[in-house]
Image: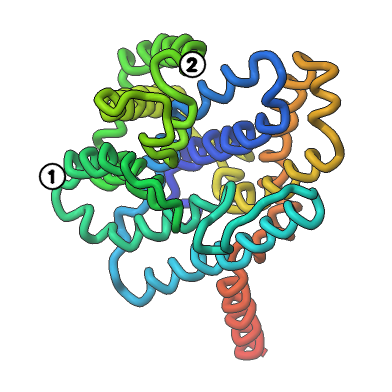
Amino acid sequence: MSPASRDPWLDNVKMVLVTLVVVGHAIGLVEETKGSHWVYDFIYLWHIPAFVFISGYLSKSFEWDRRRLKNLVYTLAVPYLLFEPALFYYRREVVGEGVTGPLWLEPHWTMWYLIVLLMWRLVTPILKLHWLFLPLSVIVSLLGGLWTDDALMMPRFLGLLPFFVLGLHLKPRHLAHLDDVWVRLAAVPTLVGIGIMAVYTDTWAETALLWYDTGYSDLPIDNEIAFQTRLTVMMVGLAGAFAAMALVPRRDLGWFTTMGTATMVIYLFHGFVIKTFLALGWPDFTAAQPILGLVLTILGAVALALLLASPPVRRVLEPFTNPLGWIEQRRRSTRSERTSA
């Protein structure tokens, strides 16, 4: 989209959410430190639902036409095919992690979102036909907990589907209500309440439920309340997502808003940096300095997101996120220069 046609609020929201993605993954380096589990559970209770909702909201225009299908291949399929093995072998050969599993068929770590978003986009023309697909998607999500096969990360495709469908069906006039005074006043106590719930996650749910990729049979929860617990987690996630988005400024924030257009760069490259710190022994330092280690990890994750989205770094890395599109653009520029000459 051209800068004039972009909604600065959406770019602000995307930048906030992708930064939280980096923070959440970075906390995996310091999971033994005091307070890390609370921070992790608080973030994961709502930031993935919010990210999926925004993805659905931005997918409204997708149709099964040649231009959009080509764009889907360029921006999701090709990056997945390239970065899935790149990150896998970096973790195994450089970092020394014992990662296993078939490439591409079972996406590992951060790569799951690319293939799941691609599949959501492919069914978007159907899902946006009628609002009745929203309650149907909730039923699909609840039943998705019975699925235990991780092929193409189907549990997350099914489990997070309601947030994507909701994004497809809500219109700008609906999201405008996030500016209502009472909504913004309620947003802070809502997030505080979720923060309190995060302290007791393992008493009313399980952290694994926040990932939407663990089957009910693998959780220490009675089968008769598994559906109810998944539904509660979904409701908390939805409330937290809207509360957080209500607090994001609507106006153009300059460099921060501009960085919100580089979320793919942040998403695809932050994992390599985080795993590098793992190889350098960052967990050992934080074990000796638990509180300081957690604070530095969070601040470092935020700085990493900002660095990757900064114009100089973005210019270097962005061609790798869409290599075919970059090659096409270069060819068009070359033809244009020759025509002008």
Q: How is the image coloured?
A: rainbow
Q: Provide the secondary structure element on which disc 2 rests.
A: helix
The C terminus lies in quadrant: bottom right
Q: Amino acid at mark 2?
A: Ala
Q: Residue at x 72, y 34 (%)?
A: 303
Q: Position of residue 164 (x, y in %)?
A: 33, 45
Residue 235 seen by the camera: no
Where residue 106 appears, as percent x and y from the top left, is 51, 57
Q: Is residue 261 above or below residue 182?
A: below
Q: Position of residue 313 (x, y in %)?
A: 74, 52
Establish if 289 lies above or below 215: above
Instruction: Name the residue tied to disc 1.
Output: 132
Query: Does the CB distance between marks 1 and 2 fall below 8 Å?
Result: no
Q: Which residue is mark 2?
A: 198
Front residue of 320 and 98 = 98
Q: Amino acid at mark 1?
A: Leu
Work out whether mark 1 precedes mark 2 in sequence or the reverse, and give the earlier one.
Answer: 1
Q: Residue at x 33, y 39 (%)?
A: 145
In this picture, is 230 found above or below 126? above
Element type at mark 1: loop
- The image quadrant that residue 239 belongs to is top left
Q: Nearer the viewer, mark 1 or mark 2?
A: 2
Mark 2 Cα-neighbour bin, 10 Å: few <14, some 14–19, many ≥20? many
Q: Residue at x 14, y 50 (%)?
A: 130
Q: Quadrant of residue 244?
A: top left
The answer to whether 192 appears left or right of 40 in the picture is left
Name the residue nearer the viewer: 59 or 29.
29
Closer to the camera, 283 or 135? 283
| Residue at figure coordinates x 85%, y 35% from the top left | 281
